[in-house]
Image (cartoon, helix red, strand yellow):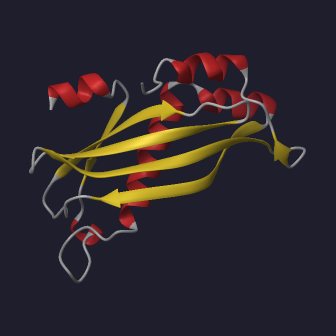
Amino acid sequence: MQTFKDQHPIHTDITVAWGDMDALQHVNNVVYLRYFEIARIDFLNKINLFETISSKGIGPVISENTIRYKRPVTFPDTLTVGVTISDIKTDRFMMNYNVFSHAQNAITTTGTSQVVMFDFQTGKKSPITEPLLSAIQQYTQN
């Protein structure tokens, strides 16, 4: 677990709720999008992205998500979702998620989100600002 956290300096712990499971008695596939969202917002909050949104009206939108399910997760469990960054372009970057199960002591799920910077005033894509670029480059996956 410590190695996982060392590889993912920004990570979020999520407690699996009973209601996250489906009729097949494992966490429903769509719930992982919510787990990714929780980790994404936590990550963006920790790098102060939301200050940029409120001051300049520019923020992230998701253009694509992928999920790979490796092992089923069941209640009770605690998951740690680690986030890294890759594929930085002028107006977008990829967020990579690894979901670590405390009960299984293993990565159960991986995924990505394509994050595009968007100017909410003009309704168009926007370049990544220098402060944001500096912040996300610290968490770039090799």
Q: Determine the residue positioned at 61% across, 29% down.
A: 49
3 relative to 87, above or below: above
| Residue 45: percent from left, percent from top | 52, 32
Which quadrant holds residue 1?
Answer: top left
Q: Nearer the viewer, residue 82 or 37?
A: 82
| Residue 47: percent from left, percent from top | 53, 24
32 relative to 9, above or below: below
119 relative to 1, above or below: below
Q: Determine the residue positioned at 64% across, 23% down.
A: 132
Name the quadrant of the C terminus.
top left
Q: Determine the residue positioned at 70% across, 39% down.
A: 59
Q: Nearer the viewer, residue 112 or 1?
A: 112
30 relative to 62, above or below: below
Which quadrant holds residue 6?
Answer: top left
Most extreme residue toward the bottom, as rendered? 23
| Residue 106: percent from left, percent from top | 15, 45
Q: Is residue 21 left or right of residue 12?
A: left
Q: Is residue 127 left or right of residue 9?
A: right
Q: Is residue 77 left or right of residue 8?
A: left
| Residue 54: percent from left, percent from top | 73, 33
Q: Determine the residue positioned at 39% across, 43% down.
A: 97
Most extreme residue toward the right, as rendered? 122
Q: How many marks?
A: 0
